[in-house]
Image (spheres, helix red, strand yellow):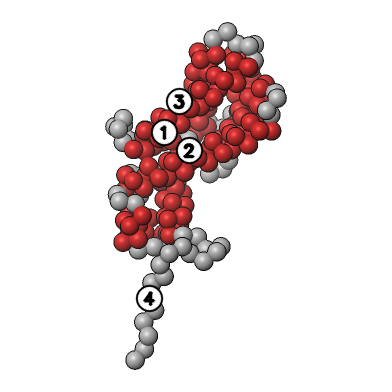
Amino acid sequence: MKAVARPRRGAPPKGEVSARERILATASELFYREGIRAIGVDTVVERSGVSKTSLYRVFESKDALIAAVAAEQDRSFWAWWDRLEQRHADDPRALLEALLSGIAKRIGRPAFRGCPLLNLATEFPDDNHPGRVIARANKEEMRARLATIVAKLGVGDPHRVASQMALMINGAYVTGLMVKPADLSGDLVDAAMKLVA
């Protein structure tokens, strides 16, 4: 009698990507490139190489998967921000310039298709959608962090200036979808520095 291989349980061997990580990476890439509503769970299953049962064992619904992708995008963005903050801990002006230049650089990438969290908010207008809740929290956190930075620069109304800066950043994300300005980085940094002058 031939032995039947049993499915492996538990954590994957060291160096191997878990089913959850494969699903998240696949969904993130497909949602970003094609749009969240355009990609069904079956496509994520097929491209990630996991079974539908495995997907639903990890994520109870497509909305739960969307929220997990948004949470990972949020985490990744703040990890990037925090690295820049550590590099420029003693120089808020240099930090602001580095952040804005970095955002412009992201917008200039060939595969740029907008801010994934703004895209999510556009596709899901329900304020209570779990992914939209994460997207909104990300934008609120960005405004709060910008207010902290501009306050260190001595700006009189840091919350108002931070809101204006967030508008510029989010506008740059949208503008980058339609036109490729010659120097988006220069324009974004210049406009922001005029706000804090």
Front tag of 4 and 3: 4
Residue drawn 36% across and 34% down? 132
In the image, what residue type sits under mark 4?
Arg
Describe residue 104's horizontal placement relative to residue 71 as left or right: right
Q: Are marks 1 and 2 in contact (CB under 8 Å)?
A: yes
Residue drawn 59% across and 15% down? 151
In the image, what residue type sits under mark 2?
Asp
Coordinates of residue 71 in the picture (x, y in percent):
44, 41
Residue drawn 44% across and 47% down? 28
Circle 4 residue: 6
Describe residue 119's horizontal placement relative to residue 142 as left or right: left
Task: For residue 159, say whether it is visible.
Answer: yes
In the image, is residue 56 above or below residue 12? Answer: above
Structural distance between the alpha carbons of marks 4 and 3: 47 Å
Front tag of 4 and 1: 4
Circle 1 residue: 135
Circle 2 residue: 74
Residue in the foreground of this view, choosing between 14 and 138: 14
Circle 3 residue: 140
Q: Residues within 10 Å of mark 1 (few under 14, many from 20)?
A: many
Structural distance between the alpha carbons of marks 3 and 1: 9 Å
- Tag 3 or tag 4, which sits nearer the N-term? 4
Q: Secondary structure at mark 3?
A: helix
